[in-house]
Image (cartoon, rainbow, N blue to C red):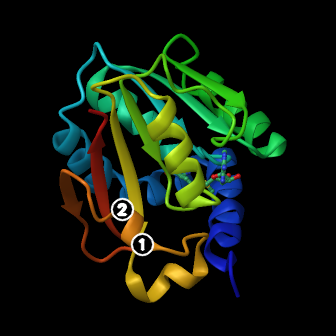
Amino acid sequence: MVKVIPKTTKILERLAAKNVAVYRTLSLYYRRLVKNEVALANIQATDKVLCIGGGPCPFSGILLHEYTGAHVTIIDNDDCCVCIARELIKKVGYTDSIDVLHSDGNNFSPKDYSVIHMAVQVSPMEKVFCHLKQGCRYGAKILVRLPKKTLSNLYSINDLSVFQSCCGKAVHSWRNVDSTALFIKS
Ligand SMILES: C[S@@+](CC[C@H](N)C(=O)[O-])C[C@H]1O[C@@H](n2cnc3c(N)ncnc32)[C@H](O)[C@@H]1O
């Protein structure tokens, strides 16, 4: 049962990366969500954004760039996702503004980034979050997407209480993502 949603998301995203109509339809799901996150963290064109877990169709990374003008680096630990996402970034003409790298959030150094964004499917969520929080620079903002409590057993989150000490939250309605929590390294 665990990972049903992350697996289904990947399948849909593979379709979206190859088909404009599917891309446009699925991106509707992310638009309001990402707009709220940009406002929550007050992301500016001068920020350097790191997205953990872009998937084959990195909607969030693309929208974060489109809404702010910031340079975005997307990482994913699945080689196949990285190849498909790179092709898509080329197709939409963002190769100068968006990089896609094969790496795991648990090993990647976040020290060069002012904003870090974590997808709800990141696994293991608590471990990757602690690694990034420890390694990022002072003042860096970390945005963590959290699932609805009733769905958390379908993701790789064991202990939602780790995320209770956030300094701000954007709550999302009608989505599997309950909210995005904002942390600022101090
Ligand atoms: C399917 S995507 C969904 C994100 C969505 N495309 C977006 O733009 O918000 C989630 C991705 O997170 C990746 N992932 C999960 N845990 C990860 C980790 N520890 N490090 C890097 N990528 C990870 C998975 O391989 C998957 O492709």
Q: Position of residue 74 (x, y in %)?
A: 57, 32
CA separation, marks 1 and 2? 6 Å
Quadrant of the drawing holding the C terminus: top left
Residue lying furthest right: 79
Q: Mark 1 near mark 2, Cβ–Cβ under 8 Å?
A: yes
Percent of width and height locating residue 132: 51, 38
The vertical placement of 182 against 154, above or below, is: above
Q: Which residue is mark 2?
A: 163
Q: Residues within 10 Å of mark 1 (few under 14, many from 20)?
A: few
Say above or below: 181 vs 97: below
> On screen, 1 above or below 61?
below
Q: In the shown orientation, is residue 182 left or right of residue 64?
A: left
Which kind of residue does numbered mark 2 sit on? Phe
Q: Which of the two residues, 141 or 145, is positioned nearer the viewer here? A: 141
Residue occupying image coordinates x 66% and y 43%: 106
Q: Is residue 29 above or below residue 16?
A: below
* Residue on which the image places disc 1: 160
Residue shown at 42% from the left, 35% from the top: 116
